[in-house]
Amino acid sequence: MKGEIQEQYEYMKKVQEINSAKTLKYSIYTMGCQLNENDSEKISGMLEEMGYSKTEDLSISDLVIFNTCCVRENAEDKLFGKIGEMKKQKEKNNTIIAIGGCMMQEEHIVEKLHKSYPFVDIIFGTHTLHKLPEDIYKILVKRKRIDDIMDIDGEVYEGLPIKRNDDIKASVTIMYGCNNFCSYCIVPYVRGRERSRKPEDILNEIKELAKEGYKEITLLGQNVNSYDGGNGYKFSDLLYDVNKIDGIQRIRFVSPHPKDFTDDVIRAIATCDKICKIVHLPLQSGSSNVLKVMNRKYTKEQYLELAKKMQEQIPGIVFSTDIIVGFPGETEEDFEDTLDVVRKIKFEQVYMFIYSRRVGTPADKMENQIPDEIKHKRFDKLKELVESQIEDNNKKYVGTIQKVLVEGKSKNNPNMLTGRTDTNKVVNFEGDEKLIHKIIDLKIVSEHMWYLKGELL
Ligand code: SAH
Ligand code: SF4
Ligand code: F3S
């Protein structure tokens, strides 16, 4: 495995030599979840090693990478639209176009690309990301299109270069793949089975990040609490060990699965002072009937029970969640159950999705699909409830003192600084730029739908 990465470093060097007399630019367009964002950071790391520098401007790019997602349908139209736009530019500038990520693990998509977009140079999958240097080398030398997709699960590769998007918060992937096969979800088919990184590789990466000045770490995986570090080393062990790393001040993780939320993890959250007291606990549906068909392996009651247990054992704990509306067969009564859980838990944040049929998943073959109109109606109703709850939650912050990690200047108002609370709420405030990258106490003076306003004490 080490040898394979070594080999890729040699390709990086060869490409860098070919490119050495030129100033070359790349842009990268990332769709999808934080795991994909983290993969894009690795792609950027490799490209910079090869002598490309980043630009946001597609029209001046010598190399354009699309890192795709296929968890919901709308991503496909968006991708094909973007690639279509690239055709003219390619004819003019000879731009190299590479498409990778989850969607490339779907056969029908790759077929469509071959047929309708033959000008795409490189197609790579989720298991062959590390081979991008070799693919680019071959394109530069042979100018022959390359498909580099593997159907079998890739290894866990260590030691790839990485160029991160942020200099204060960093994501660290702790495991790849998913074994759960929720009946609506494409991820297990395109990301393969669960593979965990070794504890020492993860901890060394985080120690390095701490040295570079990073303050906040988010541990990533499709089901982080089934992390298996070998020899009985579990997710909770990892949490304790990350908590010990000097310099890191905040730890977050996404996503845990409610069915695997064991007591040792609850204890770790309660005990470790750096773990943020907000937990993302994907609900998907509040109806036990729907949950069963979704293959989620918990009931409404078990979910509520788990949240209650955590509230009892972790002072101040709050939750965020993911919810799907309009899953096949969802009745009005089932949907009411979802609203009921939302009312009971009062989530800090809810990521809401309209059910989207995915080819190859069991739910796509179910006959009782819900008409679009009903899906949208339910979505709007849920959204209304969620927004009113967010407003209520925000009110509770006013008058309190919050620890805020200051991220930088506010994008909308350069006279203001912006940061986040432990519970991930955005706080804007007036202050000296010297406060950037520090954790400071702020008094919350007012609330707005998507941010709080704070004042220095
Ligand atoms: N592993 C994570 C989620 C990964 S996908 C977990 O189990 O929570 C992110 C979210 O997309 C899911 O939580 C789900 O709410 C949503 N999602 C997945 N497949 C979907 C589909 N076919 N239609 C609509 N939403 C979907
Ligand atoms: Fe998809 Fe379920 Fe795996 Fe999450 S746990 S990635 S929803 S199959
Ligand atoms: Fe999308 Fe792949 Fe993530 S399908 S949600 S980018 S794992």
Image (spheres, rainbow, N blue to C red):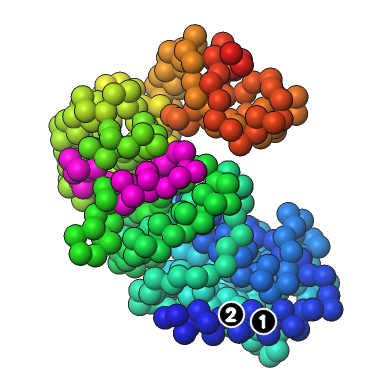
Q: Which residues are magenta?
A: 238-265
- The residue closer to the viewer here, 180 or 329, is 180
Examine the image and state in which quarter residue 99 appears: bottom right
**Looking at the image, is 425 positioned above or below residue 215?**
above
In the picture, the disc for residue 9 is 2
Q: Is mark 2 within 8 Å of ligand 3?
A: no
**Looking at the image, is 8 positioned above or below residue 206?**
below
Q: Position of residue 171 (x, y in %)?
A: 49, 51
Q: Position of residue 77 (x, y in %)?
A: 56, 56
In the picture, the disc for residue 13 is 1
**Looking at the image, is 449 positioned above or below residue 123?**
above
Q: Position of residue 177 (x, y in %)?
A: 35, 62
Secondary structure at numbered mark 1: helix
**Magenta stretch contains residue 256:** yes
Q: Residue at the front extreme?
A: 246
Image quarter in which the N terminus is found = bottom left
**Magenta stretch contains residue 191:** no
Give the alpha-carbon distance from disc 1 to disc 2, as whole Å.
Answer: 6 Å
Disc 1 to disc 2: CB gap under 8 Å: yes
Res 426 visible: no
